Amino acid sequence: MSAYARQFLSMMEKPDVDQIDGLSPAISIEQKATSHNPRSTVGTVTEIYDYLRLLYARIGSPICPDHNEELKAKTVTEICDEIYKLKEGSKIMILSPLVRGKKGEHLAIYDDLRKSGYVRVKVNGVIYPIEEFPELEKNKKHDISAVVDRLVIKKSEEDRSRLAESLETSLTLSNGLVEIENINDGKTELFSSNYSCSQCGYAIAELEPRMFSFNNPYGACTRCDGLGVIQYFNEKRLIQDEDVSISNGAIKGWTRRNRFYFYQLRCLAEHYNFSLTTKWKDYPQDIKDIILWGSKDKVDFSHRFRSGSRIVRKNKFEGIIPSTERRFKETDSDFIRDELSKLMSKSSCDECNGSRLNTKSRNVFINKTQIHTITSMRINEALNFIKKMRLDGAKKKIAEKILKEITERLTFLEDVGLNYLTLDRSAETLSGGEAQRIRLASQIGSGLVGVTYVLDEPSIGLHQRDNAKLIRTLKNLKELGNTVIVVEHDEEAIRCADYIIDIGPGAGKHGGEICAHGSLDDILSNKKSITAQYLSGKKEIKTPKKRLPLSDKFISIINAHENNLKNISVEIPVGLFTCITGVSGSGKSSLINQTLLPLSSFMLNKSKLTKEISCEKIEGLEHLDKVISIDQSPIGRTPRSNPATYTGLFSYIRDLLTQTIEAKSRGYKPGRFSFNVKGGRCEACQGDGMIKVEMHFLADVYVKCDVCDGHRYNEQTLEVKYKDKNISDILNMTVEEALDFFDALPAIKKKLITLNDVGLGYITLGQSAITLSGGEAQRIKLAKELSKRSTGKTLFVLDEPTTGLHFADIELLLNVLNRLRNKATLFWL
């Protein structure tokens, strides 16, 4: 660890432990997204892409994009060798190509050649003395070459030396090109010291790894700057509601409140004779185009002020989309830029087709395959391709070690169940479980021994088929000479462990004890262990004895073809608890999260579509009135976000404290107990209770505030108490403790009951959002929805809600989901 990082260790809270013995160097692999950087991909994170860049730089063959000819670079010696293949006595002319198919009079070239002492020049295939340089038509294309030397092929050392000197002169004069004309038969051949095309002169520099990096200007696509996607403003994002008129706010940012822009639309309407009170959908297309893209005619934007003065101005109307694009580029305000970016859509770059690379980098091949073709393959496909790659001679020897590294890393990714990912998959789209397994694969590839690895539920998101691969990988890590400690609820993983420690018996204050430890047989024989009861079959998660009848109402997804979906059509019954299942990478998320969810949100919740949906249509949404997605994303990204604020409990608690005699005597309002505004909060940490320490190249670290000691509030605010508890004490209560404490307050108790019902009785009300797991965050969202009144027509979409749950908690959750099913429509992914 660097000295910079070590200086913060003393600031961090120490674990509450007396002693730890026998601990080897440790590596913790958590379930956190690898990166929020859009430039990070699976390939870059695992370093596989670095090896691919090296491979293509060393043995790649550049191709001319226009003539499909391999670009070859030759040294002067190699060019000499090629020339000496002609018969001895052959007469040749050495030419330096200066102009190749370019329009112009090219008088500057004539002046330069004459001053440099050249006596002959070849123009459009004809040799002229330099004094007789022809007058050229500037609108026609011309070819011009300087005659460097004429000689007869003789295999003497002196003649070879003269030939080499002439070749070097020509290559210098024409930036790496030389043309050899056989005077006997008139045939010519072009040679280059650069990688260039013999037909058009298209050339590239020597291949380097940076040429294939989309994070380097040398290799990145100039259109999308190496991101693979472009952002743009379009009608769908700018028009808020097609059923509304412009005067009633149809166009985002061009409403009556924005007087300057709305005045322009009024002038435009007068000029083209259309009404601002007409619904947007009722405008003819030519009027829509003028409003969106601008006018060809000049429009009178003159304005008379109340004072009587008048500004006369006639200009073409810029158009809403060009105007918004200009403001986005020119603004220095982060706020305006963020607001305008919400109106943008993304699409694959039309220049590089999503490959992120420029033309020169895309046109380098190995066995007729480009680098971005490999990165677009799934892991198992890429592995198969690399294994079958056939190379000969020097290329085989050069690539041997590089291919070995690539093969090993791809194999590790396949072994941890990630064979369905592609190397160009953006790291910011990975789930916590996927990111963790990628880091696990990287650690296996590092080959470290004598290390203690600590993993948090690596089986999350894996189908049972892939679980065996993961367990085998963990055992391989152990067999290298490491210690592997896994926090896990998966039954197969528990049964395969060499040693098991069962902590419980319950959660929160009901846990914290070692119920059993030892081998699987030792655990099964322990009567105190709840885990053992489920493993032995004494307890089990009960399935309903009676199923609800199939509804005659369906939601139909027609011809979905997102990612790997093959134009499938699916019917999902309304009013039932439906489970979408399948092996990892089979298309579950593509069908629900990337097709059904965005389209139903667009049609029911009036949310905006950020990209085109790969689906013909969805039918049956008339049976629903809204859709709610309950995923594992954090409920907040700062320490100020917590279960109390997210579920709405905090408002009731603040109001309650405001009603106390002490608060009334001091004139405290609910805002006094907020940690988002000045007054009652600790200003040293601004109500966070922790101080964020930026570690620059490392993850940020949060340390307890030494002013308020983590209480979040100042001393005066903490003096206000309800039933001998101040605001900090209440926030530090677990849900179970709060249930007893607020037993007489129905509004608060109702929300606490739902949190307890989803198995979160152990979390504290004020627990920081940054310390909650994805599964806990999801269940908090679920509890919030349970506490609301339902219309009975709500579509709930949950993404793996059993993540991080013990057998007993899964049973609790299923009961809650069935309750929710009785109030709404539920899909469980």
Image: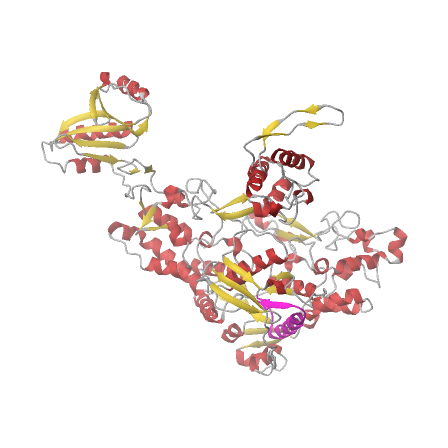
The residue sitting at 51% across, 76% down in the picture is 495
Q: Which residue is at the front of the view, 63 or 488?
A: 63
Q: Answer with left or right where residue 712 lies relative to residue 74.
A: right
Q: Which residue is at the front of the view, 811 or 348?
A: 348
Q: Is residue 781 above or below residue 98?
A: below
Q: Answer with left or right where residue 76 lies relative to residue 259.
A: left
Q: Is residue 461 above or below residue 607?
A: below
In this rendering, the count of numbered labels is 0
> What span is colored magenta in the figure?
800-829
Percent coordinates x, y for residue 542 in the rendering: 60, 79
Report the residue that reaches farthest toward the top.
Answer: 131
Percent coordinates x, y for residue 294 in the rendering: 56, 36
The residue sitting at 21% across, 21% down in the picture is 128
Q: Answer with left or right where residue 401 lies relative to residue 551.
A: left
Residue 451 at least partly seen? no
Percent coordinates x, y for residue 571 in the rendering: 53, 68
Q: Is residue 759 above or below residue 699?
A: below
Q: How is the image coloured?
A: secondary structure
Percent coordinates x, y for residue 198 in the rendering: 26, 37
Q: Which residue is at the front of the view, 337 or 728?
A: 337
Report the residue that reaches farthest toward the left.
Answer: 89
Q: Is 826 one of the magenta-colored residues?
A: yes
Q: Is residue 380 above or below residue 50?
A: below
The quarter holding residue 642 reads: bottom right
Report the residue that reaches farthest toward the front.
Answer: 273
Quadrant location of the C terminus in the rendered image: bottom right
Q: Is 609 one of the magenta-colored residues?
A: no
Residue 472 at least partly seen? yes
